Amino acid sequence: MLQLVWLIPVLPLIGFLAIGLFQKKFTGKSAGIIASATVFISFVISCGLFFQLSSAQTIDYFDWINVGSLKIPISFLIDPVSIVMLLIITGVGFLIHVYSIGYMGHDEGFARFFSYMNLFIFFMLILVMGSNYVLMFAGWEGVGLCSYLLIGFWFKNNNYNKAANKAFIMNRMGDLGFLLGIILIYVTFGSVRFSEVFSGAAKLPDNQPVIVAITMLLFIGAMGKSAQIPLYTWLPDAMAGPTPVSALIHAATMVTAGIYMVVRSNILYSIAPPTLEFITVIGTATAIFSATIALTQTDIKKVLAYSTVSQLGYMFVALGVGAYSTGLFHVTTHAFFKALLFLAAGSVIHAMSGEQDIRNMGGLKKKLPITHFVFLVGVLAISGIPPFAGFFSKDEILAMAGVQSKPLFILLAVTSVLTAVYMFRLYFMTFFGSFRGTHDQEHHLHESPSVMTMPLIVLAILSALGGFLGLPSVFSEHHLFKNYLSSSLTVPSSVIHSEPSHYFEWAMILVSIITLIILIAITYNRYVKKGYVTPLAEINFSKTFKTLYHKYYVDEIYEALIVKPLYWLSDMFYKVFDLKIIDGTVNSVNKGVNAASSTLRLMQTGNIGFYIFAMVVGVILMLIYNLYGK
Amino acid sequence: MNTLIILSAVGVLALFSEMLNFKKALGAIILLGLVGAFAADVMAWNTNRHYYNEMMVVDNFSVAFTGLLIVITFLWFIMSPDFFREPSSRIDHFALIIFALIGGQLMTSYNNMLMLFLGIEILSIPMFILAGSNKSDLKSNEAALKYFLMAAFATGFLLFGMALIYGATGSFQIQNITQFIKSQQGNIPVMLVAGILMMLVGLAFKVSAAPFHFWTPDVYTGSPTVITAFMSTVVKTAAFAGFFRLFSMCFESSSATWANTIWALSALTIIIGNVTAVYQTSFKRMLAYSSISHAGYMLMAILALNQYAQGSILFYATAYSISSITAFAVLLLVSHLAGNDSIESFNGLAKKNPLLAFATVLAMLSLAGIPPLAGFFAKYYIFTAALQQHYTGLVIIAVMGSLIGVYYYFRIIIALFKSENDDVVIPVNNTFKVFLVVTSVAALLLGIMPQLVAGIL
Amino acid sequence: MNHLIQQVPLHYYVLLSTMLFCIGVLGVLFRRNAIVIFMCIELMLNAVNLLLVAFSVYHGDAAGQIFVFFIMAVAAAEVAVGLAILMMIYRNTKSVDINFLDKLKW
């Protein structure tokens, strides 16, 4: 199998080149079929690796850069961590490719779309397979580029272009941190190869300032790519791209690159406890902030986008408490259920002829039975209801966090509750009640073709059963996932080494199930029985408040104590944090450069006299400095 | 040496072609001559011989840079023929370009100040004429006069510097000066310091480093685009080769006297070039500012002067020239049809001609320094070389500058994909197609295997 | 002849030619007539020539004087081109004042 490893990234690259260069030759669906086939073969090879490989292997091909002491080979590191990522990328990627054949079927840029998708898969594979930081960075930049191309895929719409630009600028900020981190690694260890860096780091004691600096810089890169506070606002905007892109890039794979990078560098992070704490704080803050924002969004994809940001925060918390395998476990289950949710949402949007506002949906249960069913599976999985996949991974993160600190546990538990609320709100508003769209839309409603529903069903099965890869110790002694990964991961000495007690776990499972059932009941009551629909305009909003005032006592408390503050918080986070502070910073940097540019260019007066004057001043300054200044 | 002879023969032949009536064959003769010159150049690899009483030396540095100059000139000849306003004057243009190339070669291989001076002048005088070759266009006139006046002024400084160095060391020969500086053991006489600084002014002008860069945007904008393409690639590369050779081989051991100055020039050039480029509406003028900023990056290699500096400056010059000449080629075609060189005229190019758009995207990405294109490694090498000499502050400025650079290069890419109402297909002839494919492949190939060029020095 | 030149101390030559050079620079800076600017540049070059000759004599080395010939030849070629450019501009604008040339800016 090892001889075939190079094929894994090369096949999608060939797909990209073939489709990209001969776009016009590919008529009908052939481009989509070829693109899917390349990814599928890569997936088969990855499966082969999974079954045959027992230890980490580095495979060298040729030297990419070879100047003086700097040697950067093209070489791949195949170990459990990268195999897990390979399986996710090629497996989920393949399903999304197949789905896109249906979803993008009527688009004039069909072939172009698939060529970009294949290019993305190629770079993503390079990112996870590379055996040194520079190769990883090349993949990192590549996926950024593809994300940019795909967000702006429908480039006729100017808003889409703006979103693409924003994603690009924000990611650049993160990339700058990553690049500086790599340079610092090279300066410190004299190499950028994982094997050499990690063996060098293994000899170092905890809390070295330079290691803390390196890990911080790398994490800044991860913050950009994985949409953490404060670099997360690009992700919701990136929803402007086609839905399969959101599923593949902005949910299942690219945004988890930051997590992969931290897991890959776990040896460095384990000896830098301050960075781990920082990651925990950022992860928790992101998880809870974006969960509250998701409560009020009305665009189906935006809800899912904020939810993704929130789940990414969760994953970082797992990494922050040193539970690397748990983080990766959540990456896996999240890839299943979030891809499922996005694709199902795509199916809904497809059926609604492009409508994305859930206020105009409702009652789709009957018309889209398959989509409804798989969406429900996704919602159950993300809300953490046993035995669906999300339950196990989330439960494990909560348990690990609970061992480390109780306040952290409570914050995460609250987030988990919020997740259930907004997901069920989304679910009920979309599929229950009466249809609120136009007549044309209602007439046009149809279930998606089987090329789209088949991947959905496969993903639904994975979302339902994926959690059994990592049963908590209450149920089973063998945590398959953790055991598989254990050879490539370390455990930081700074965290508390103890498994949560069985008593604690049982309590947690029961409490979470009961809470969730209550919440679902409340949400059901509010959005289905009462048929509450978030008003279309904000003016109606306060009126709704007044009408609600005279209703049940429970409703009032619910409104006053939970809904109102949450709405307020959510609104504030969205308005102040998202729009003012973060967008404001991006915009003001932009404006600053523009202003400087328009001023500096006035120096170019066009007058030779002035030019010569500037030269003479330059000469005089140089002479004064060098002859008298020293 | 044979390269020089072949090139001179081609230049003279070009002058006579009108008289002897073989105008039609001239293009082929020149291209053949360039191939021959390139072959002769490659043959001289590793010979390290001196010529003309040691006034010229053909070492690997000069062979590599001369090779690069010839290749770029070759590319220029392939793309240019269709874009002269007066086809009748084509022959004069061709001859002048060949002579300028000879000047460029002298600048890469001088071993004596006199040769450096002659090289600069042989390169510059044809460029004055070419800059003004649109005789009826007032902008072209203005460009020529600005270029001429300021270049002559800068030459004055260069010569004054040479005279002072001669006074201090008693020789124009590079080795003698080097030995003299070494023998002083750090106590450099004031006259020599002043001489080095004056020469620095003259050369900084040639490579358009701020604050001696003011001529660049105006001259690049005013000159016919074909000529600007040549100026921003061949002339710039030659100037840097000369600059680097002088400071790395001759003044290296006195680096304490000029390092801070070059540091400041480099930082200022990067900032001014990048920031001013943002606001430009003309593609051509934007490229002019971008070429200023690239000069700033290349100055970093002169500052670093370690074992990586040679390879990195050669690679940078290669990556920059290839992407730059592609950009100018596309500009030529687009502005020819649109009638102006504004960025708007690139709108919707992706639909009008995908190949042109593709080549432009690659060129812009490479100039912006996005991996895996050549420009990324060019910047990477230079930054690493500077970092190894602990110029961290300058590298930070340079990284910031290149981030601004990404912003304006991407404006072009965005323009390419804007939808336009009139979907006219832009016709491109086959030679031009080959040219675009070759340069694009080169930009990619150098990004994938940078050691092909960077490793040879 | 050499003897005669050497009667004057070397730094006098350096001083003189630096002054001449500066006068040339100032002329280029303050004059607006392109022809006068040409002349000022010539003055700068001649200051260099003077310096080279003086050094040449003091070092007892002919290279400096040969350099002067090259400078003179090249300067002549340069001025020929320069005047041609100026002629072209005069034809188009009927003026040789460099202040009128600011079409290219910003």
Image (tube, helix red, strand yellow):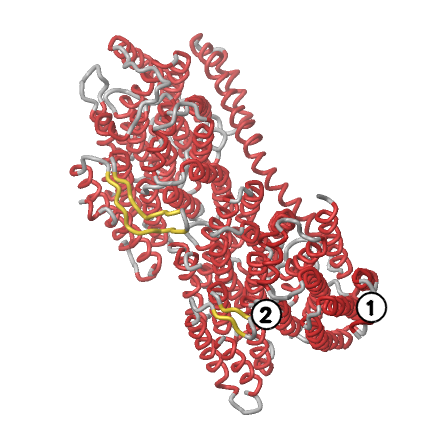
Q: Quadrant of residue C77?
A: bottom right
> Front-most of B430 and B340?
B430
Q: Chain of mark 2?
A: B
Tags 2 and 1 touching, CB below 8 Å? no
- Tell me the tag on residue C33: 1
The residue that disc 2 covers is: B227
Image height check: is A462 above or below A183? above
Q: Is residue A604 left or right of residue A401?
A: right
Percent position of residue B19, x then y: 58, 91
Q: Find numbered disc 2 in the image and state the secondary structure of the residue it sits on.
A: helix
* Camera sees residue A295: no
Percent position of residue A192, x then y: 38, 40
Q: Residue at x 74, y 54 (%)?
A: A614
Q: Find numbered disc 1 in the image and state the secondary structure of the residue it sits on.
A: loop
* 2 and 1 marks on the same chain: no
Q: Given the current orientation, which residue lies at the most extreme front position?
A: C3
Q: Residue at x 46, y 25 (%)?
A: A293
Quadrant placement of the N terminus of chain A: top left
Q: Amino acid at mark 2?
A: Ile
Q: Is residue A479 left or right of residue B384?
A: left
Q: Chain of mark 1?
A: C
Q: Amino acid at mark 1?
A: Asn
Percent position of residue A616, x then y: 75, 56
Quadrant placement of the C terminus of chain A: top right
Image height check: is A319 above or below B382? above
Residue mark closest to the camera, 2 vs 1: 1
